[in-house]
Image (cartoon, rainbow, N blue to C red):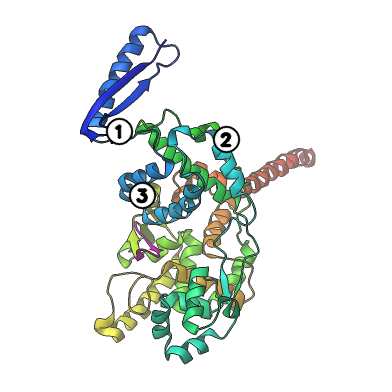
Amino acid sequence: MGVLAIERLLSEGYHSDGTQIKRSMTYTPEKGMTARQAEKEAQRQAVLFEENCANGLYIDQSITLEKFIETWWNEYATKHLKAKTLQGYEQYLSRIIPAMGHLKIGKITPAHLMKFYNNLAEEGIRKDTKYVCTIDLKAAAIKKHRTKQSFSEAAGISLYTLNNAINGQNVTQTSAEKISAALGTSLQKSFRANSEKTTLSDKVLLHHHRLLSTIFQTAVLWQVIPSNPCNRVKAPKVEQKEVRCMDDQEMLRFFDCLEKEPLQYKALITLLVYSGMRRGEVCGLQWKDIDFNNKILHIQRTVLYTPKKGIYIDTPKTKGSDRIIKLADIVFTELEQHRKQQAVQRLQLGDRWHNEDFVFTQWDGNPLHPDSLTSWIRKFVRKYDLPYANIHSLRHTNATLLIANGVNVATVSKRLGHSSTATTTKTYIHAIRSADEAAAEVLQNLFQSVPQKQKNIQ
């Protein structure tokens, strides 16, 4: 069966040689179609093509991938995707466009993709090496500009970034270079690279593949290309690693050390452990979300940060993330004590307090910077020589302990706000296997004891 060629003259103008601008496409009937079905579908495609041309939606498949990505970004991504998602996509596109942007989108094959993935896996691809300050930065900054605030402004960085550098935490190469320039010294004299790994992780490779697949699939929907080349290559394989979490004994010591910390962080960390909330979710919690009488809380917003937007409020990560969960009495006891302390702080600050109802705040009532939690727990673990823990590992600990103690996966998934139980099963497969083995041993011990009981009766 042949193909249908569709051609339409555009009225916008002419080529430089005087010929009229034309747009064309071909339609190839699918295998198994009858002549009548093919003709009907061809006519439908012709009408759709005409409408797309008239509405300016037709994109020539001879355009480059870079040009298509630009259209996709402006017409779809920025209008429908979350700022945090766009931030990650920008990082991946910074590698995709230089490598493949010059190729015509209609000519990209699985071979091009495999070559790109293999290149990403090579040494030296990482450009996000972090840096740690090797001098007394606080003294140097104050000596140079009297206060940290004035130094941060002179360097063109946030005070938060400067404090991270002062406290020996990782900063980006760009921030390290700005700080060094403000000090009047070189990067090598004031910072050292804090990353020996120069290859991208398997997970990051997979994210590149998924983004490309999303872009190509959009091109298919917009009828720029007939099929998605990503569907014809194997996605980069990611080894499923066991999540990091603490056992019950480690958690007891963790809570003992927490008793010595400021009340706000004591209440916050207790809430994280008992609820399994995400970092942004706990930052976005407001007092109106908490029902002290019924011991439940409603998770319905998240506080996030990107360099472009700063700290901002967003909707939860997924539809299932907007949820109501019930918690233990101890959580509400800690929250009540924190609320009383916050009320005193609010009265002391008067009109300087930003009364936005957030449960956990900066000194002036504004929501916490999400990264400040990451910084705090890193210092807390080092201070008391505790086992490895970060904010997300507390979420893992919550889920793992629930599964280990017999709570079914569907309930755990709902409490965590996962989009499906499949996500929970995949993430906590090791905990599920351990619980399953424990269940098998319980049955084995139960049934092995039956003959012995009968023998004793006889």
Look at the numbered discs 3 and 1 and tell me whether their residues touch, using CB distance below 8 Å. Answer: no
Instruction: Name the residue carrying label 2.
Output: 111
- Circle 3 residue: 81
Marks 2, 3: nearer the viewer? 2
Does the stretch in magenta take in 52? no
Q: Which mark is in front, 3 or 1?
A: 1
Query: On the rendered image, what quadrant is the C terminus found in?
Result: top right
Residue 125 against residue 343 in the figure, above or below: above
Stretch in magenta: 300-311
Q: Where is residue 61 in the image (x, y as percent from the top left)?
A: 39, 33
Between 303 and 12, which is closer to the camera in this rendering? 12
Q: What crowding class fits label 3: few (fewer than 14 Cα within 10 Å), some (14-19), or many (20 or more)?
A: few
Residue 158, image x and y in percent?
41, 75
| Secondary structure found at label 1 | loop
Query: Mark 2 to mark 3: distance in Å?
Result: 29 Å
Mark 1, residue position: 58
Instruction: Tell me the crowding category of disc 1: few under 14, some 14 to 19, or many 20 or more residues within 10 angstroms, Cα based.
Output: some
Quarter occupied by residue 15: top left
Q: Which of marks 2 and 3 is nearer the N terminus?
A: 3
Residue 237 visible somewhere in the drawing:
yes
Disc 2 marks a residue whose amino acid type is Ala
- Do tag 2 and tag 1 residues touch (Cβ < 8 Å)? no
Looking at the rendered structure, the kind of residue marked 3 is: Leu
Q: How far apart are marks 3 and 1 (CA)?
A: 23 Å
Name which residue lies at 42% across and 28% down.
Answer: 226
| Residue 226: numbered disc | none
